[in-house]
Image (spheres, rainbow, N blue to C red):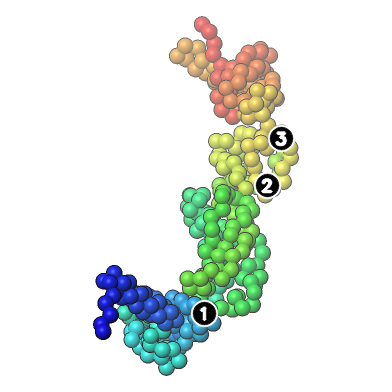
Amino acid sequence: MKSHFPESITRLLQLAIVIVTCSQTILAEELIIELKDVATAFSPQVLLRDVAKVKSRSISDQMAAEAIELRLLDLTVPEETIKARSITTRLVLAGWLVEEIRIIGSPEVRVSFRQPELLTDTVIEEAATEVAFAMMGGDREDLAVKLQSVFVESLPPNLRDVDGLMAKVNPPDKVGPGRSIMQIQIWDGDRIVATRSAAFDIRKRQTVAVAKVPLTRDEPIDERSVRFEKRFVSTTLDELDGSQVFGQRVRANVVPGTILQARDFQTTPAGARILIKKGDLVTAYARAGKLQTRLRNVEAMHDAGLGDNIKLLNRESDNLFSGKVTSPGTVQVVIDR
């Protein structure tokens, strides 16, 4: 006697068989291997981890597969090709079943050899310099970024001697001359194996005015007493030029080698920089209409800055008159006619 199942039940049974079959297939795929298009090996022995990303439900199986040697490179040729089929064969020889392996990605990978380079503090500093340059701008050559303490030697022994590690420096919220803390990620291939913070000393090359000789309060600065240099400094300084320095007087005595700042110069009560000091002999130009003459032996009666009105004494006639400071040691006098 034939048994007759409703058509709907028959379809449900068929669907159940498909689901069971797919589940068995998924469970059988112990290894999923995603091949790269190109890869770099830091040893003549090419391991599976060098050319592919390996995934498995078992961590121990994943690590064992990653450590399988695929080929010994011929260093006389620039690159070699490893095909997916040969990788499957190598895994089967190591004990995996064909149905336990699924290879995705490229059907083959081109492998080249590169001499291994150990991670160094210099590499860390170069990466941090690029971050600082991207945030601060200017010229790359005007930045000097140095670690304030050793970094690589502070890593665990199982990391600091690994070939081919890469460092990525994450940008801080802000950066400028001085001390800066940056986070560093250490990568082994496509995996982060360590994350640490490090302190850097950031210096920017700036043009500064430097005292060549001792400077005193009474002597105006000239070309013989100050030179201009480009220096790497860890703070933002006033970048002064000759027009801002020559003719000035310092507030206090300065020793040679001191970097001068605007705050080091004397100022008038109004806050302007002193260009003429009480008792100085100045050059006074007197103008009457279109005529101008130069007055000699003229003494300043008080300190004055650029644009200030100043009282003057003509030592030859003992006459007092006034003028306006136009530059260091120079006064313009207007005579009404």
Residue type at numbered disc 2: Thr
**Quick one: SS at disc 2?**
loop
Q: Is residue 248 above or below residue 260?
A: above
Q: Where is residue 95 in the image (x, y as percent from the top left)?
A: 45, 92
Whether pointer 2 and pointer 3 mark residues with C-beta atoms closer than 8 Å, the reply is no
Q: Position of residue 112 (x, y in %)?
A: 39, 81
Residue type at numbered disc 1: Ser
Most foreground residue, 134 or 314: 134
Residue 288 horizontal side relative to residue 322, left or right: left
Q: Earlier in the sequence, mark 3 or mark 1?
A: 1
Whether pointer 1 and pointer 2 mark residues with C-beta atoms closer than 8 Å, the reply is no
Instruction: Rate crowding at label 3 as few (under 14), some (14 to 19) or many (20 or more) other CA atoms within 10 Å.
Output: some
Q: Name the residue under label 1.
A: 58
Gap in angstroms between the C-alphas marked 1 and 2: 66 Å
Q: Mark 3 points at which residue?
A: 251
Q: Earlier in the sequence, mark 1 or mark 2?
A: 1
Instruction: Rate crowding at label 1 as few (under 14), some (14 to 19) or many (20 or more) other CA atoms within 10 Å.
Output: few
Residue type at numbered disc 3: Arg
| Residue at point 56%, 50% (across, down) | 173
Most foreground residue, 72 or 96: 96
Q: Name the residue under label 2.
A: 258
